[in-house]
Amino acid sequence: MKWTISQIQKHRSKDFLIDELVRMDVIKETDPTIREVSPIHLTGRADISASKVTFHIRIEGHLILPCSRTLVDVNYPIDVETTETFLLNGHDYEAEEEVYQVKGDVIDLEPIIREILLLEVPMQVYCDDNGAGQEGAPQSGKDWEVIEEQDKKEKLDPRLAGLAKFFEDSDSSD
């Protein structure tokens, strides 16, 4: 995902299409909650002018993250579209958009892709099937168990069963 300015300028009058599969395992070092990163598929194009290069990129792949409830692996899909602009000279800065200044002769998209992937990691992720068949956090123990919200509404606390009978008796006497 690195190009020199001269390589980019050769495509100024032609289409500069991007279709690459890159490994981004580096983000696991930054965020230890990421267990695995699939190969990331980058597609898009670049608009090249004399003063700037604008990349229109779609980032697709998936991350393996731990379920916040059971700690089993959850396949979290990534599908992001972004537009990133690199200025080739520092004089053409527009304040309303975020741009990157090219340092040296090389445009490198990898740090930007890494940042976008890290921003896509949610604070909490839950598995749909409660980790059926996978070893995760225990779902019950001595005097406790994990219950669903619906089960909680339907289940009556045994300590309050006598109170429910009290209200039934008072309704029938009225």
Image: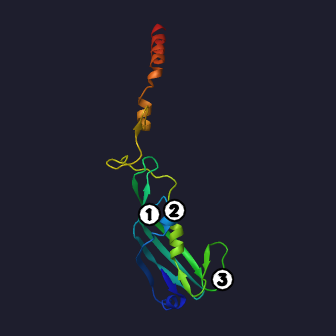
Badge 2 element: loop
- Between 135 and 76, which is closer to the camera in this rendering? 135
Q: Residue at x 62, y 73 (%)?
A: 98
Badge 1 element: strand
Q: Alpha-carbon neighbours of circle 2 within 10 Å: few (<14), some, or many (≥20)?
A: few
Residue found farthest to the front:
142
Where is residue 59 drawn, in percent x and y? 45, 70
In this rendering, the answer to whether 96 lies above or below 162 is below
Residue hosting label 3: 92
Amino acid type at mark 1: Ile
Badge 3 element: loop
Residue hosting label 2: 31
Residue hosting label 1: 78
Amino acid type at mark 3: Asp
In this rendering, the answer to whether 118 lies above or below 149 is below
Residue found farthest to the left:
133
Where is residue 35 drawn, in percent x and y? 43, 60
Q: Residue at x 44, y 65 (%)?
A: 79
- Between 143 and 114, which is closer to the camera in this rendering? 143
Amino acid type at mark 2: Asp
